[in-house]
Amino acid sequence: MDLTLNEIQTMLQSSAREFMEDQVSKARVLEIDDSENGYDPDLWEQMSNLGWPGLTIPEEYGGLGQGWVDLGVIYEVMGNYACPSPHLSSAVLSAEAILGAGSDEQKKALLEPIATGQQIFAFAYTEPDYNWSPKAVQLQATKSGGSYTLNGTKLFVPDANVADQIIVVARTSNGSNPEDGLSMLVVDRNAPGVSVRTMTGWIGPKVCEINFENVSVDASNLLGEEGQAWGAIENAHDRATAVLCAYMAGGAQRVYDMTREYSQTRIAFGVPIGTFQRVQDHVIDAVTDADSSKWTAFEALWKLDQGASDASLGVSTAKAVASRGFARACDAAHHVHAGIGADLEYGLTQYTKRARTLQHYLGDHTYHKARMAKMMNLANQS
């Protein structure tokens, strides 16, 4: 396995760094985070002009057809700057769900607007019983004639408040195997009976509660075969999770960089605080968590590009590491920074909020360790 960046990846990394340095300042991130929608349409338009939403979408559907390591390089830089955007929800999670389950006609109709950034998709999976396993999906889609009726609630859905369309994972039948009976429906966010509420709290990316009250969805908006969506869902989850891990690794690296610099410049008792052993412990904790998050993330992305048989295992390894690593790096940073670390304008809290939110998104370390045990034939996933 060679994780050395090739010429294209080096170019993407350089371009992303230049863009982030120019457009994504700490002040702008704080402003976006504090805004009602947590979204900057001008920033999204600029990212779309760079071709990022279509980077991994096949050329035949309006994208650039690049690999997952290519996108991971960009995401690592995005995480380094705590860049907020609906890219993961729309251009990765939703796009991969459409690619995995949609008909050719649906792919042509839905993917090009995603690739150009003209439309934003959200992916509604989790519910009040927050879990990423198939058994946690209980929202019912009842078919009658040529349409489905949705009733229920989805919780903690990123970007639903700014989405044009929402891919809703619903249960169209019940069986002994929870993986059976899951379907995906494309729902207009402004359809009658759909209500979206932005959830409040000390969080990074905005997440939403979506309520469906007798929402009628035409059967033509069903992605793939009824009740057979789990394979495409899991495939989309894997790719989005690996990319998310690169973002988290980039964030952990920035947190380490801030902590190391502060330990060298903050003077106490006439010497830099980095000369104190306990401070050194925290700095070392931050760098080991940042490094382990990065290399497990890029190993997972590389395995996805190679079509490796253990790619899913690599993805869960990466998320188990990143979910804990990013949060622990932030904890170490706050120990070193003390009071200044809580100053919103200083910038450390922008990463801490993301670490606390993203450690759960697409499965926390407990979920992914259980998934790993199942794939390794050690135990059944609980």
Image (cartoon, rainbow, N blue to C red):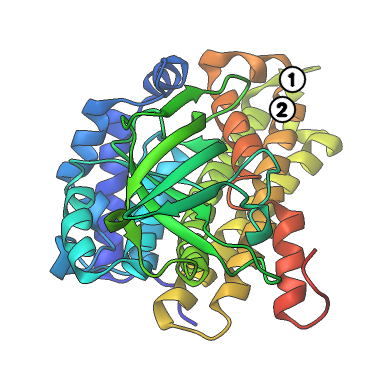
* Location of mark 1 (residue): 338
The amino acid sitting under disc 2 is: His
Q: Nearer the viewer, residue 361 or 149?
A: 149
Residue 307's image quarter? bottom left
Q: Which quarter shows the C terminus?
A: bottom right
Dot 2 alpha-carbon crowd within 10 angstroms: few under 14, some 14 to 19, many 20 or more: many
Please say if 280 is above or below 211.
below
* Residue for point 32% across, 34% down: 21
User: Mark 1 and mark 2 in contact (Cβ < 8 Å)?
Assistant: yes
Residue 225's image quarter? bottom left
Q: Position of residue 215 (x, y in %)?
A: 41, 37
The amino acid sitting under disc 1 is: Ala
Q: Can residue 45 be seen in this view?
A: yes
Q: Position of residue 205 (x, y in %)?
A: 50, 32
* Location of mark 2 (residue): 334
* Residue for point 61% across, 68% down: 179
* Residue with the most extreme front position: 145
Q: Where is residue 242 in the image (x, y as percent from the top left)?
A: 51, 61
Residue at disc 1, secondary structure: helix
